[in-house]
Structure formats: C-alpha cells, structure tokens
Image: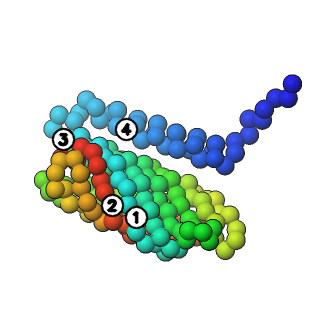
Amino acid sequence: MKRSSTRCTGTGRAARLAGTAVLLLCVPCLSFAGTTSRHPIRVSATYGVGAGSIGYAGALGLSFQTGHDLFTMHAAGTGVPFVNAGMGDIGLLYGRSSADRYTNASVSAGLGYTSGRVYGRDVRTIGIPVEASFTLLPCAYVGLGIGVFGNLNLTLPFCGGVLFLKAGKLR
C-alpha cells in the first residue's frame, strides 16, 4: 500500500497559512474580551474592487476593533484577468482607527505572504502589507468607503485603490 506524501502543495500551504492567520488574529481578540466595557467592540468584513498598479484590484478583510486598536486579516491583490499576471498578499495587520457616529478612518500595517506571477515568472516572498481607509457609516451595520493598500517587498511592490462595502457591527 502506497503511503500519501505529507508534502504541502501550493493550495494546501495557502490554506494552512490562512488558518494560522485566523488563529493569530483571534488570540488578541480574546485577550480584550474582559476589558471592553468602556469601548464598543466592532467586528466587520470588507469587500472592495478598484484599480491597481498591475491592473484591476480587489481586497477582502476581516477586522476586529476595540477602542482605537484595530486588528485585521486581509487579502488584497492587483492583476490583469486572462493574461496570467498579478500580485497578491494575505496578511495580518495592526492599526489605529478613529471613529465617530457616521465615519471611520483607519491606517494599518503588518506582515504578509506575497505571491503572484509577473513577467512570466512566479514570485513568492514575505512583505509588509499596508492599508488606509475612510468609511461612511449611514447605519450601524453597513458602510461604504474608499481605501488604498500596498505591499512593500523586495521582489515586486504593488498597490491599489478600492471602493468597498463594509458589513458588521460598525457602531
């Protein structure tokens, strides 16, 4: 009987990285659970599309905020469909946020895994994802905003701007 290999494929590696990122994001969230009586807890998911340095851009995010502290797990990228060219990252970010009843502004940076295909070659590296956003909050559970993201790495830095929809507990 042939034994299966334990070697991690590209998809498996990305899934393990995403699972680890979720766990690492949850640990700080749980540590704030007993100290949030003064600050409302805000949890949200973000989806945005726009333009980037290599073509179209897209961004997804899951954020947890208490007070001014913001923890985000994000996936962002830029590329050209059907041409097999683009760059993207999955990262954990920490940032600061300022919010009032109808607006929210934030800036975050962190560490991420970056991969893509540019100029006919595969690129995989570690990068520093950064993002900034401004959100209008017409109600307590849905917001519309604009954001910029980038990834600083030694191989091929990239950036993009998106219009996004944010949903969750925003106030």
Q: Is there a contact, CB below 8 Å, between mark 2 and mark 3? A: no
Label tally? 4
The dot on residue 28 is 4
Looking at the image, tell me whether mark 2 or mark 3 is earlier in sequence order: 3
Under mark 2, the amino acid is: Phe
Residue 16 vs 93, above or below: the answer is above
Looking at the image, tell me whether mark 3 or mark 1 is earlier in sequence order: 3
Q: Residues within 10 Å of mark 2 (few under 14, many from 20)?
A: many
Q: Is there a contact, CB below 8 Å, between mark 3 and mark 1? A: no
The dot on residue 164 is 2
The CA span between labels 3 and 4 is 15 Å
In-front residue for pair 106/83: 83
* Whole-percent x, y for residue 35 in the image: 23, 33
* Whole-percent x, y for residue 155 in the image: 61, 68
The CA span between labels 3 and 1 is 31 Å
Looking at the image, tell me whether mark 3 or mark 4 is earlier in sequence order: 4
Q: Is there a contact, CB below 8 Å, between mark 1 and mark 2? A: yes
Q: Is label 3 in a helix, a strand or a loop?
A: loop
Q: At x 53% / y 74%, what residue is drawn?
A: 54
Q: Which residue is mark 1?
A: 49
Q: Nearer the viewer, mark 2 or mark 3?
A: 2
| Side (left or right) of 99 relative to 108 | left
The CA span between labels 2 and 3 is 25 Å
Quadrant in which residue 163 is drawn: bottom left
Q: At x 40% / y 64%, what residue is drawn?
A: 49
Quadrant in which residue 153 is drawn: bottom right
Q: Is label 4 in a helix, a strand or a loop?
A: helix
In-front residue for pair 15/130: 15
Looking at the image, tell me whether mark 1 or mark 2 is earlier in sequence order: 1
Q: Residues within 10 Å of mark 4 (few under 14, many from 20)?
A: few
Under mark 3, the amino acid is: His
Q: At x 60% / y 69%, what residue is drawn?
A: 82
